[in-house]
Structures are given as structure tokens and as C-alpha cells.
């Protein structure tokens, strides 16, 4: 029997990451940058990892440092990713 001590469901957290990823992709596309361009600009050498984060694959997601660097690179407020 698994006991859940969290105040958030797995589905809720998944939807949270999905919203962030969708917004990162939206702002990246608005700036006409490829995943590779943005990944390299923020210091990620693997476009596959960036793609997995942006597309919510294999339980990968952006951490707060990634989001900070992405916001600087795309010249948007970090809060915009959470809207």
C-alpha cells in the first residue's frame, strides 16, 4: 500500500510542467529560435534533453535554473512561463 503525503496529485504536477513547457515553446517560437539554438544559449549541450523537457517526454522537465536562463535568453519575465 502506497501512502501519499503530498498535497498535489501526480496529474496536477504533470499539468503544471506541461503548462510551463507549452509557454517555453510558445515564447521560443515567437523569437524564431530552434530548440538547439536555445539549448546551447542556456548551456545545455543536448538538444534531445531540451526537447524532452519541452515536450514532457520521459518525465523530464525544466528546473528553476533552466527557466531563469531561458527567460533571460528569450527576454521575457520568468513569471510568464507560469501563466
Image: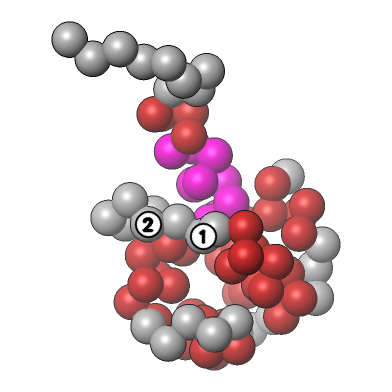
How many badges with numbers are in the image? Answer: 2
SS class, disc 1: loop
Residue at 69%, 46% in the rendered image: 82
Identify the mark at residue 60; answer none if there is no mark: 2
| Residue 74 seen by the camera | no
Q: Is residue 10 left or right of residue 71?
A: left
How far from the left and from the top, in percent, is residue 37? 54, 89
SS class, disc 2: loop
Identify the mark at residue 62; answer none if there is no mark: 1
Residue with the most extreme left position: 1
Q: Is residue 72 left or right of residue 13?
A: right
Residue at 48%, 34% in the rendered image: 13
Mark 2 and mark 1: Cα distance apart in space: 7 Å
Quadrant occupied by the C terminus: top right
Magenta region: 14-22
How far from the left and from the top, in percent, is residue 75? 80, 75
Looking at the image, residue 78 lies above or below residue 59:
below
Q: Nearer the viewer, residue 30 or 59?
A: 59
Q: Nearer the viewer, residue 61 or 74?
A: 61
Q: Is residue 13 left or right of residue 73?
A: left
The prevailing secondary structure element of the residues shown in magenta is helix
Residue 70 found in image quarter: bottom right
Residue at 43%, 38% in the rendered image: 14
Task: Mark 1: give few (<14), some (14-19) or many (20+) Cα within 10 Å.
Answer: some
Q: Is residue 55 left or right of residue 74?
A: left
Amino acid at each position: 500500500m502506497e501512502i501519499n503525503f503530498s498535497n498535489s496529485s501526480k496529474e496536477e504536477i504533470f499539468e503544471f510542467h506541461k503548462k510551463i513547457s507549452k509557454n517555453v515553446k510558445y515564447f521560443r517560437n515567437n523569437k524564431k529560435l530552434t530548440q538547439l539554438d536555445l539549448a546551447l544559449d542556456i548551456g545545455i549541450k543536448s538538444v534531445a534533453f531540451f526537447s524532452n523537457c519541452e515536450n514532457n517526454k520521459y518525465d523530464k522537465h525544466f528546473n528553476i535554473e533552466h527557466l531563469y536562463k531561458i527567460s533571460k535568453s528569450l527576454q521575457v519575465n520568468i513569471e510568464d512561463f507560469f501563466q
